[in-house]
Amino acid sequence: MARDERGVTAQSEDFSSWYNELVAKAQLAERGPVKGTMVIRPYGYRIWELLQAELDQRIKDTGHENAYFPLLIPESYLKREAEHVEGFSPELAVVTHAGGKELEEPLIVRPTSETVIGEMMAKWISSHRDLPLLLNQWANVVRWELRPRLFLRTTEFLWQEGHTAHLDEADAMRETLQMLDVYAEVARDIAGLPVVPGEKTPGERFAGAVRTFSIEGMMRDGKALQAGTSHYLGTNFASAFGIQYLNQGGRQELCHTTSWGMSTRMIGGVIMTHGDDKGLILPPKIAPYQVVIVPIGRGDAADAVRGAVDGLAGQLKAAGIRAHVDDRLHVSPGFKFNEWEMRGVPLRLEIGPRDLASGTGLLARRLGDGGKTAIGLDGAPQTLAAELAAFQSLLFQRAADFRESRTADVNSWPEFAAAVETGWARALHCGQPACEDAIKAETAATPRCVPFDAPAESGPCVRCDMPSAYGKRVLFGRAY
């Protein structure tokens, strides 16, 4: 297999190996001692913190409050909503012994929290004046993955899960779509992912939901990644847990509930959407270091450079730029350049004695032709802020152009099969789960969503020739 000088498999040779090697070499995460678990290293966790902060602020800005609920859930809770427990049963981790004895009732390690939060909602809601109840939880969950991959599918992962209760379907649907919009905004504006929002087909709905919506991103191998989901649960969980309210007419009514979540798989999405054969490429808004400054020089000259570099770093930090000075003496400047390129830092600034004498530094961008540009140190904070904004936009546009180049409208089965080999197919579809199963069996592709912005169109299903069910094309692709 082709490898670069740092030993990373080329994307074109083996995308999976490229990904696994990069996660380790960029110091993002390591495998944990239990199969399927991961240890998120400080650099990777800082990316999560930055993404989390952006999402958390938007959650709060839309009126939600953070709370926390137990990790352990009584087995009987999950059994109250039959479709929900059936959907999660293969992935459950169950505690049967604790305190040196067998438990009277097994406990489920939280796979998601609709049930335990539903139990609390039933206690907290009594009147229409208590609605809407808008809750969010930042937590870990456990789903026993058979084929784990760091960040993308791990047995334990981090996420936020929103849970809300409403007077009626209309209000709950507004909530469901509002939070999908929030996810799309974070993906687009913060992570640089040009996602497609839409509704899942019945065969792809969340277990127990009436309607499920998602945002779908294309990775650089042409596969799809579900980057966030939002569910309208109807009155299914309200009925199971007695979540009801006294309406203005004095009658008891069931609440309409929602749930929605985004997880650490977004970091995997960032890696696979933006990375290249040289390594990681981070959007500036979630880069732990937006600018790395490398001082160059020896002896007395090095001391002068270091003093100037420290002062510049202070100016950049005061301007809100996350700057880092790499002053390690035991490695060469070339080693540093390669390492920070591997780790995806958007901008690198080199400053040596000659640069200092001329009042300039050499700027290297993570994307581009590899050339370097001299910039004035006096105006560096303003120049670098503009460069970071341009880099963020460039990454998004690059990903959007790639997605469009790998997405095709198809009208025949041979066209469909060819399109999903390398990307996505937009096709008319009958909506029957049996047809979806047959498509998956033959091509490994699944319906990702029915895009909101797809134009109205009718005709026969691309595979079975039955009439299309959605009045528009469905997005299909192979997925993580």
Image (spheres, rainbow, N blue to C red):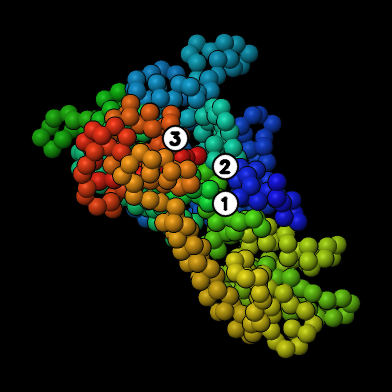
Q: Amino acid at mark 2?
A: Phe
Whether tag 2 and tag 3 are in contact, CB under 8 A, the answer is no
Q: Could you say where residue 417 lies in the image, as x and y percent from the top left?
A: 42, 40
Q: Which residue occupies the foreground of this view, 101 or 159? A: 159
Residue found at the very far right of the displayed protein: 299
Using a 10 Å C-alpha cutoff, classify the residue at mark 1 as few (fewer than 14 neighbours), some (14 to 19) or many (20 or more): many
Q: Upstream in the sequence, badge 2 or badge 3?
A: 2
Residue found at the very far front of the displayed protein: 414
- 88 lies left or right of 34: left
Q: Quadrant of residue 277?
A: bottom right
Residue 151 marker: 2
Q: Which residue occupies the foreground of this view, 117 or 140? A: 140
Q: Could you say where residue 377 lies in the image, as x and y percent from the top left?
A: 66, 83
For image coordinates 26% across by 34% down, the residue present is 465
Q: Which residue is mark 3?
A: 443
Q: Amino acid at mark 1?
A: Ile
Q: Upstream in the sequence, badge 1 or badge 2?
A: 2
Q: Amino acid at mark 3?
A: Thr
Residue 447, relative to residue 254: is it above or below? below
Residue found at the very far bottom of the displayed protein: 358
Q: Quadrant of residue 168?
A: top left
Using a 10 Å C-alpha cutoff, classify the residue at mark 3 as few (fewer than 14 neighbours), some (14 to 19) or many (20 or more): some
For image coordinates 55% across by 29% down, the residue present is 145
Q: Mark 1 to mark 2: distance in Å?
A: 10 Å
**Eye-nearest disc, 1 or 2:** 1
Q: Which residue is mark 1?
A: 271
Q: Could you say where residue 19 lies in the image, as x and y percent from the top left?
A: 62, 46
